[in-house]
Image: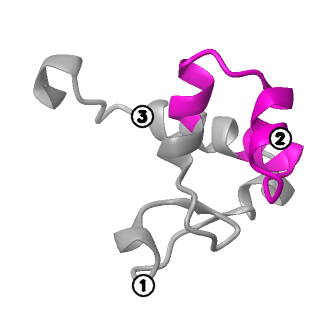
Amino acid sequence: MDNQLLNRITIDTGICNGKPVIRRMRFTVAQMLELIASGMTFDEILADYSYIERDDISACLLYASFVTNNKGMITISELV
């Protein structure tokens, strides 16, 4: 576990309704994952969002891996 990376992900009920965000900014982990899923490269994300750092992207991916690596996983059909 890389605590340095995970420290970049913060949760505060006063920011984005308590969703996990990058460094207390109004940029959620979900937004980052959507950019990556859409096919954007790290370099494209960094070019489009000057306040995002490469470690922020890695932190989002690491956070997502921990969140999805649990026994309480919900199915896609439950989401739609």
Where 36 sits versus 27, above or below?
above
User: Type of residue at label 1?
Assistant: Gly
Q: Position of residue 49 (x, y in %)?
A: 75, 49
Give how far apart the Cα atoms at labels 3 and 2 are.
30 Å
User: Mainly helix, strand or loop, the magenta region?
Assistant: helix
Secondary structure under the numbered disc 1 in the rendered image: loop
Q: Which residue is identified by label 1?
A: 14
Q: Which residues are drawn in magenta?
A: 33-59
User: Type of residue at label 2?
Assistant: Leu
Q: Position of residue 77 (x, y in %)?
A: 13, 18
Q: Nearer the viewer, mark 2 or mark 1?
A: 2
Q: Are marks 2 and 1 in contact (CB under 8 Å)?
A: no
- In the image, is residue 60 part of the stretch drawn in magenta? no
For marks 3 and 2, the one nearer the N-term is 2
For the N terminus, the quadrant is top right
For marks 2 and 1, the one nearer the N-term is 1
Q: Which residue is identified by label 2?
A: 46
For image coordinates 13% across by 25% down, the residue present is 80
Secondary structure under the numbered disc 3 in the rendered image: loop
For image coordinates 79% across by 29% down, the residue present is 44
Q: Quadrant of residue 61?
A: top right
Q: Is residue 9 left or right of residue 58?
A: left
